[in-house]
Structure formats: C-alpha cells, structure tokens
C-alpha cells in the first residue's frame, strides 16, 4: 500500500488530469466491449463468453490492415467490419443452435471458441507480443491540460467511444429499428408472429456487439500490446462492468466502465499490488447491496 | 434426464430400504476398486501408468466435486478451479514454511479451503445461473492474480519452487512413487465414496429438488441459500484435495493450477462424461487426460482440437458419453422386456 502517493496525486492537478485521462481510456475501451456484451445479453439472453475474442480479432485485423495500407482509418474500419462479419457467422452457425439449451451448453460452445480463436491467432500471427505502433497522424506533441499530459490519441479514443454510446442509446430508444430490437428482446415469439424476422435481428445484434468489441480492439491496438489471449482479461473486466452497471443496461455499462477505469488508474497509485483486487472488492460491494447492479431492472 | 425423473414411472421410490442396501453396495464397490487400483503396480511395471492414475485421482476428485454443483444442484460454477489451485498452494506453502507432518498440513489445507469457500460462497450462491457462473469466474481470476502478484509468498509466475518436503509419516513415504500412488488412490476412493454418500443422502435429494425447482423447495421450508452454501463448501473441500494430490505429484504449485482454464476443463470433463450419473465425471476425467496427452503429443495447437471436440459434444451429441451408454443400455433392456 502506498497511500501517500495517492494523496499526493489527488493534491496535484497535473497528476489528477493524467490519471483521470488514463482511467477514462481504460473505461471507454471497457465500455465498448461491455456494451456489446450487455446488448447481446439483453436481446438474445445469452452471455457471449467468447466476446473477448472479438476484441482480440479487432486489434489484430487493425494491425494487419495498418501494416498493409498505412491508413489508420482503414485499420479502424477493417477491425470493426471484420469482427462484425465474424460475429454474424458465429451467431448464425453456432450460437443459434444452443438458444433453447441450458447455460452449460452455451458456456461450453463459447469456451470451445475461446480455445479455437486463441489458437487461430497463434497460428496466423504467432504467439509473441506484437505492437501496432502509434499512427503517424497522432505522433504530435501531447496537449497540456492543467499541467497534465494528454496525448491527442486519447482524446480521439474517448470521443469515438462517447459517440458510439450516444448513437447506440439514441438508436435504441428513438428509431424504428431500435423499437423492433427492443420488442424482440421483450417477447421474441410475439415479435416474430407480427412478421418480423427475429433471426435477422438476433444476427444483427450479435454482429453489432462483435463490431463494438472489434472497434475497441482496433482503438486499443496502438496503445496496447497484442497477444493471443489478450481478450480474456478484457472479457472478465467487462463482465465485472456489466455486473456493476446491471445486465442489459447501456447507461449502466457506461457508468460501470468509467468507475472501473478510474478505480484502476487511481488504485494503481495507492494499491499497486492490489489494483485488480480493488475492482473485485467494488463488484462485491455492489452485488451485496444491489444484486441486480446499479441500473439493472428487478428480475422476476 | 434427471435421476428423479429417470425412476421407473408408476413404481414408488422405496427410498429408505434402497438407501441402506445401496450404501453397503457403494462401500463394497469402493473397497474392490481400491484393491484393484492398489494392486496395479504388482502386475504392471509402468511408471507412466502410475503417473496417469495419480493425475486421474487429482482431476477426478476435482471434476466429481464440480458435478455435485453442476449436475446435482444446478449451480454452474465457472470458478471451481480456484479451490484446486488454493489446495495446491496452501498445502505446498504449509509444508515448505512450517514442516508439520503431512496429515496435519492436509487438514489445515482443508480448513483454509473451507473458510475461503464459505466467504466466496456466501457472496456468490444467491446469484442465479449466468451471474453465478461469471462471479465465481471473477473470484477465480482474483485468486490467480493474487498468486501472480504476491511474489514473496507464492513465487509469482514461476510458481512454488524448491520442491515440497515430504517427510515420512506412519511408514508412508510420499516421495516414493508407489507410496504416492497408493495414497492418491486411497484419497480418490474415499473422496468418491464420501461424495456418493452426500449425493444419496436426504441432503443430496434436497439439492436435486433445488435444481429442479428452487422456488418450490423454498416453499416446502428448505433454506435454499444455506443448502447451496453447504454444497459449495463441501465441493470446495474435494476440489482442494485434488489440488493437494496434484501438488504432491509435481512437488510444487503453479499459477496454472488456479487459472480459469482449469475450471473450463472441469466443466468440459463433466460434459464429456455426463452430469446425470455419479461416475460420469470420472469417466470424463480418464477420457480427457488421454485426449489431452495424445493431442499435445501431435500438435502444439491443442486448443483447436479440444475446441472441436467440445463443439462436437455440445452441439452434436448434447450429452455426455456416460449418459449415452446408459440410455443405450436402458433402450436395449426395454426392447428385451417387450420381446
């Protein structure tokens, strides 16, 4: 424990800004993964245990595209689109077969794919750590806000995630497609009786969730090292986020992700050896006081 | 599917008499199994075979205890491996640091595991289905990351090295492979017998009732939370015993023992053997270890092969091999009666 460092940081505005931004980017990346997880759970009622793999694929797709084309925008696009297609195939071919089955089967199918996807990445890209490197467009002087250092790339990352949150939230509550998706989540058989292709909705939601995780991976590629199995720790953390925020709630995912991000960045100062422990401790406190999460609805 | 439903329709379940007879039968089976296993080294002079059976004992206890949760109570724990790791590490650390006799260290390990399971279980067991699965998984990752970061105590990612001292007690020298083999078999058989007793006891039938309809169980006056917590702690004890065997076998403890893949393997073993019979997970363990050993010998990408096998079972068969065998046997006998 190093509480003095934490107190010293809280007192200095420069350190406060630096830690807050690093907390925000951890939180925003987690949000993009967690919101896909929560969306898929809300509509399909399955927990995509292999969701971390989409994050991983997003990062690797982006790295390869960037190395070939040299364009950062193309890298992001490929990361997101590639995982969306992967998600669609995964849902239609495999997951759709275990919707009626119990949780054990769903977990097993996903577990199988965690093993398979990790090995596919190991085969194609090799087992060693890779890094994409910061794109040239962002290799500029960092901004100084109140004495704290903020790389411009961080701002882009936070911005993209915020836009995704707003588009998703507004899209679900305001548009016709959003209404159909919510109807399918509420009562799939009635929705399908009204002439709506629920299979298509399910596939679409899964692809959207995969795309968001892929986008998170692509955005994380320049600032994180890439390794097979990188998706798993993200999966666990984003699951903690959805548990804290409440399964199926987008706002909950956002708040939960930001809280976890801040806990991680400030916790690493005060409790360097117990940063992860803090996260779990926080989850336990939320679960004991509110078993459905901060924004979760009461489950009958 | 379930044992209650699988009872022949129309005939009343004559429980008490059945139970006493079954109990003697189980004890007799256990003694025979132990004698057969313990006499193997007399006939086969193969080190590899003994090693294989020792690993089977460790994983078998772990997988069967997981079945008490998954198959009997319907609690899908995805973090059961934490108790396997906890058992291995606590036992190894107690032996290295204090030098107490092995039985004392073993009992101390069980006490530690029970306390840990009671605390973690108290938080987890009121959650349902997927929440329960993931929160147990989260705790597993917490224990794993604690092991990795507490380098001064656990050796971090290098694992607990330097060997675990194995002083001779009551004339048993666990440093000797045959002694270790017989001790593992004894622990396995005793563990299985105890778990069988739990499964066939009135408490075991309470668990099945909770699995089939928790709300109804609660209406007839069962404290569901307490029953779930009890079985969670009991299962943790057997998983931790598996961990102790493993740490004696490799003479150390490694972070992989507490990693989530152990839990995943446990679930897979249960699926492979089948969760509707008591010995299904044991069959699953043997199959899994054979499969794992064969695959790792031929390819470094054993994740892909294992994944495809899992998919075959989960999507193709939708049940374990033991379930398959029993259904096939029942169907054949049914035809025989009709003819």
Image (cartoon, helix red, strand yellow):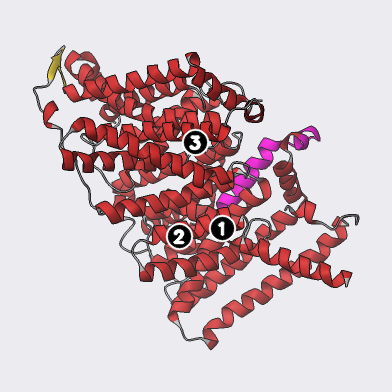
Give the magenta range: B216-239
Q: Which mark lies nearer to you, 3 or 2?
A: 3
As drawn, which residue projects farthest toward the left? A141
The residue tagged 3 is A203
- B238 inside magenta stretch: yes
Can the viewer see residue B168 in this picture? yes
Q: Are marks 2 and 1 in contact (CB under 8 Å)?
A: no
In the image, is residue B31 above or below residue B7? below
Q: Which chain hosts label 1?
A: B
Q: Measuring 56% from the left and 39% from the top, which residue is drawn there?
A: B121
Q: Which mark lies nearer to you, 1 or 3?
A: 3
The residue tagged 2 is B306
Q: Indicate the secondary structure of the residue bearing disc 3.
A: helix
Q: Which chain hosts label 2?
A: B
Give coordinates of residue A119: x percent, y percent: 35, 54
Calculate the distance from the C-alpha at mark 1 to the C-alpha at mark 3: 24 Å
Q: Are marks 3 and 2 in contact (CB under 8 Å)?
A: no
Give coordinates of residue B312: x percent, y percent: 53, 58
Residue A211 relative to residue B61: left or right: left
The residue tagged 1 is B313
Marks 2 and 1 belong to one chain: yes
Residue B280 relative to residue B87: left or right: right
């Amino acid at each position: 424990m190093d509480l003095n460092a934490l107190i010293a940081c809280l007192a200095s505005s420069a350190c406060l800004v630096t830690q807050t931004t690093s907390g925000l980017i951890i939180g925003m990346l987690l949000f993009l993964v967690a919101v896909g997880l929560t969306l898929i759970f809300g509509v399909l009622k399955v927990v995509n245990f292999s969701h971390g793999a989409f994050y991983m694929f997003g990062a690797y797709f982006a790295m390869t595209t960037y190395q070939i084309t040299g364009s950062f925008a193309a890298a992001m696009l490929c990361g997101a689109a590639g995982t969306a297609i992967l998600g669609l195939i995964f849902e239609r071919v495999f997951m759709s077969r275990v919707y009626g089955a119990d949780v054990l089967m769903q977990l097993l199918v996903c577990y199988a794919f965690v093993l398979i996807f990790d090995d596919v990445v190991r085969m194609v890209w090799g087992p060693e750590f890779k890094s994409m490197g910061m794109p040239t467009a962002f290799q500029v002087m960092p901004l100084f806000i109140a004495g704290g250092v903020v790389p411009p790339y961080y701002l882009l990352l936070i911005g993209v995630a915020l836009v995704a949150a707003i588009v998703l939230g507004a899209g679900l509550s305001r548009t016709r497609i959003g209404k159909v998706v919510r109807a399918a989540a509420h009562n799939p058989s009635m929705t399908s009786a009204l002439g709506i292709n629920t299979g298509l909705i399910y596939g679409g939601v899964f692809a959207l969730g995969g795309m968001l995780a892929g986008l998170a991976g692509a955005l994380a590629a320049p600032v994180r090292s890439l390794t097979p199995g990188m998706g798993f720790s993200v999966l666990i953390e984003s699951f903690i986020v959805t548990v804290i925020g409440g399964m199926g709630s987008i706002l909950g995912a956002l708040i939960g992700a930001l809280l976890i991000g801040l806990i991680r960045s400030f916790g690493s100062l005060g409790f360097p050896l117990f940063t992860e422990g803090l996260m779990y401790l926080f989850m336990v406190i939320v679960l004991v006081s509110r078993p459905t999460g901060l924004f979760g609805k009461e489950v009958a | 599917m379930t044992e209650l439903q699988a009872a022949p329709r129309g005939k009343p379940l004559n429980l008490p008499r059945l139970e006493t007879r079954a109990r003697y039968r189980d004890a007799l089976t256990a003694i025979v199994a132990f004698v057969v296993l313990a006499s193997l080294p007399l006939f086969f002079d193969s080190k590899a075979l003994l090693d294989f059976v020792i690993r089977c004992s460790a994983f078998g206890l772990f997988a069967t205890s997981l079945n008490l949760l998954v198959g009997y109570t319907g609690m899908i724990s995805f973090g059961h491996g934490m108790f396997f790791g906890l058992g291995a590490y606590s036992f190894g650390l107690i032996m290295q640091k204090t030098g107490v006799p092995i039985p004392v260290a073993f009992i101390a390990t069980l006490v530690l595991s029970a306390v840990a399971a009671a605390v973690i279980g108290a938080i987890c067991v009121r959650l349902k289905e997927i929440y329960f699965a993931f929160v147990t998984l989260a705790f597993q990752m917490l224990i794993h990351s604690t092991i990795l970061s507490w380098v001064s105590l656990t050796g971090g990612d290098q694992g607990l090295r330097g060997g675990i001292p194995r002083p001779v007690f009551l004339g048993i020298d666990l440093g000797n492979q045959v002694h270790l083999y017989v001790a593992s078999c004894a622990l396995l058989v005793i563990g299985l017998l105890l778990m069988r007793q739990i499964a066939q006891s009135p408490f075991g039938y309470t668990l099945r009732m909770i699995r089939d309809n928790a709300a109804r169980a609660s209406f007839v006056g069962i404290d569901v939370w307490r029953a779930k917590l009890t079985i969670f702690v009991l299962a943790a004890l057997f998983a931790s015993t598996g961990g102790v065997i493993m740490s004696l076998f490799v003479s150390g403890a490694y972070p992989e023992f507490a990693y989530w893949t152990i839990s995943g393997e446990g679930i897979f073993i249960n699926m492979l053997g089948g969760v509707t019979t008591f010995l299904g997970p044991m069959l699953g363990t043997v199959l899994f270890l054979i499969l794992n050993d064969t695959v790792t010998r031929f390819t470094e990408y054993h994740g892909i092969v294992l994944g495809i096998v899992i998919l075959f079972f989960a999507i193709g068969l939708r049940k374990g091999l033991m379930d398959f065998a029993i259904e096939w046997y029942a169907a054949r006998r049914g035809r025989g009666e009709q003819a």
